[in-house]
């Protein structure tokens, strides 16, 4: 057994022992070893932020150990524009974390001959796993980036499977191959494409990560009905993907401070509405879908930081001094964004701090909305 095969078996055994890899998927994971799909140059976090390349040829064992860890691996940065020597700023393609891949395949609830459309082929690993379990004739996979699409096609062929591979915008789906029993998206959306609903047979599922500019969002499983609408619960808020290319969240630059700024203070620490409780962050994002956020660390070696919120011409900043109980707030523009965030957090607390799993998404022909507990109760 080669080093790679031994490491693959170790990973599969670890996922099985942790209860994340259902037995029905074990054979596919053993057959479609992850290293076959990972390019020789991968991108790892740089100390100063961003990404630097790690090459297989520099140290094949280190590269293999990285490939066989339960971690996502960035396989493209800056849409391929960064030089191979780096650095790169934005992760634009990756091979997903094995335990997340296994969990998503489990959420998909497939059986023999289930027909699946995958959006976001990336390296092709997920399409290979689906092909191994369901047969390549039942799998169609779309990738928007031509270079990545071609690399994945070759990796799939090298692994001995040939699902239908399409290069194009996954937001359009692939109508000529439909209707599908399942659509699985491994890139996130803020606006669920109606084409996915139209191309899923009644009773079929769409599994996708739905989020907002404020929050990475959560995995939602929508069941499509015979009237062309889709509805279903959020099932997992621990997953994060890159956005569908046309739906990337904006990344505004903090403004040079103008005059006319409203000053106040807050006792709400920005972490409380963001990282500390993903349920809170999700709910605030649902109520404030067009508000984006950013954290900027102080450059004085302390843990102090500034939290920024942006929406159109409005912005707010909260300067946090670690250990302090009150923080300085400055807001500018027609909207008082920090006050809105505080009000949304208070709303979430007042309705009993619901977990993300109590929310669901309804996608109708002309609108889509998040609900709490029942589609009759839009948020
Ligand atoms: C997290 S990666 C996918 C991981 C992949 N399923 C795998 O097994 O390696 C997300 C992929 O979605 C692709 N993507 C982004 N926008 C897309 C779009 N509009 N249509 C199709 N693919 C898209 C990205 O280029 C990227 O390769």
Image (spheres, rainbow, N blue to C red):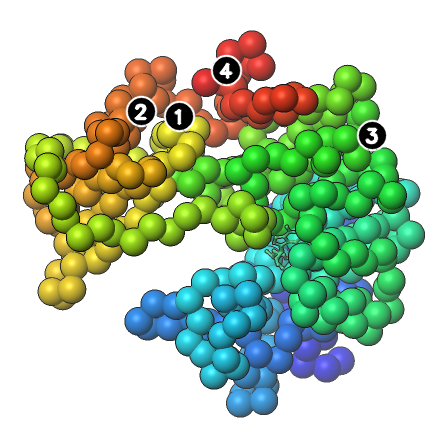
Which residue has dot 2 on it? 344
Point out the tag, 1 or 2, that comes first from the N-terminus: 1
What is the spatial separation of the Cα atoms under label 1 and label 3, in whole angstroms?
31 Å
Query: Could you tell whether 347 is left or right of 356 in the image?
Result: left
Point out the tag, 4 or 1, that comes first from the N-terminus: 1
Point out the tag, 2 or 3, that comes first from the N-terminus: 3
Point out the tag, 4 or 3, that comes first from the N-terminus: 3
Query: Disc 4 vs disc 1: Cβ atoms closer than 8 Å?
Result: no
Q: Which mark is residue 201?
A: 3
Q: What percent of the width, then of the height, locates residue 206? A: 70, 35
Q: Is residue 354 above or below residue 207?
A: above
Q: Which mark is residue 229?
A: none
Query: Disc 1 vs disc 3: Cβ atoms closer than 8 Å?
Result: no
Tell me the residue at 79%/56% (across/down): 166
Q: Residue furthest top?
A: 376
**In terms of secondary structure, where does tag 2 sit?**
helix
Q: Answer yes or no: disc 4 within 8 Å of ligand 1.
A: no
Tell me the residue at 75%/43% (across/down): 173
Tell me the residue at 58%/62% (across/down): 94
Query: Could you tell whether 244 is left or right of 317 in the image?
Result: right
Q: Nearer the viewer, residue 83 or 55?
A: 83
Which residue has dot 4 on it? 378
Query: Which quarter of the rendered picture does the N terminus lie within?
Result: bottom right
Query: Disc 1 vs disc 2: Cβ atoms closer than 8 Å?
Result: yes
Q: Which mark is residue 287?
A: 1
Query: How busy is the neighbourhood of tag 4: few (under 14 within 10 Å), some, or many (20 plus)?
Result: some
Query: Could you tell whether 44 is left or right of 157 in the image?
Result: left
Q: Answer yes or no: disc 2 within 8 Å of ligand 1.
A: no
Q: Nearer the viewer, residue 107 or 256?
A: 256
């Amino acid at each position: 057994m080669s080093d790679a095969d031994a490491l693959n078996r170790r990973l599969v055994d670890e996922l099985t022992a942790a209860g994340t890899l259902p037995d029905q998927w074990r054979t596919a994971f053993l057959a479609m070893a992850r290293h076959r799909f990972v390019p020789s140059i991968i991108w790892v976090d740089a100390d100063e932020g961003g990404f630097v390349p790690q090459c297989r040829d520099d140290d094949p064992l280190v590269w293999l150990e990285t490939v066989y860890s339960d971690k996502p691996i960035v396989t493209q940065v800056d849409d391929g524009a960064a030089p191979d020597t780096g650095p790169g700023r934005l992760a634009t393609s990756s091979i997903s974390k094995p335990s997340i891949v296994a969990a998503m395949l489990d959420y998909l609830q497939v059986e023999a001959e289930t027909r699946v459309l995958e959006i976001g082929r990336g390296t092709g690993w997920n399409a290979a796993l689906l092909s191994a379990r369901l047969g390549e004739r039942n799998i169609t996979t779309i990738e928007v980036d031509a270079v990545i699409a071609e690399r994945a096609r070759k990796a799939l062929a090298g692994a001995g499977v040939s699902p239908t591979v399409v290069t194009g915008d996954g937001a359009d789906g692939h109508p000529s191959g439909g209707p599908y029993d399942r659509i699985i998206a491994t890139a996130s959306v803020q606006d669920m494409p109606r084409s996915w609903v139209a191309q899923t047979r009644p009773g079929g599922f769409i599994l996708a990560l739905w989020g907002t500019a404020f929050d990475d969002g959560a995995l939602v499983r929508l069941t499509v009905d015979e009237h062309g609408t889709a509805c279903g619960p959020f099932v997992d808020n621990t997953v994060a993907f890159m956005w569908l290319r046309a739906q990337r969240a904006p990344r505004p630059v903090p403004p040079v401070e103008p005059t006319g700024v409203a000053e106040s203070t807050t006792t709400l620490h920005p972490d409380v509405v963001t990282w500390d409780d993903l349920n809170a962050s999700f709910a605030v994002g649902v109520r404030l879908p067009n508000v984006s956020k950013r954290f900027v660390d102080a450059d004085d070696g302390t843990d102090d930081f500034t939290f920024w919120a942006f929406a159109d011409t409005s912005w707010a900043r909260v300067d946090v001094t670690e250990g302090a109980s009150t923080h300085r707030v400055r807001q500018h523009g027609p909207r008082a964004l920090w006050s809105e965030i505080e009000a949304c957090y208070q709303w979430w607390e007042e309705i009993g701090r619901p977990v993300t799993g109590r929310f669901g998404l309804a996608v109708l022909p002309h609108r889509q909305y998040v609900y709490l507990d029942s589609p009759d109760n839009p948020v």
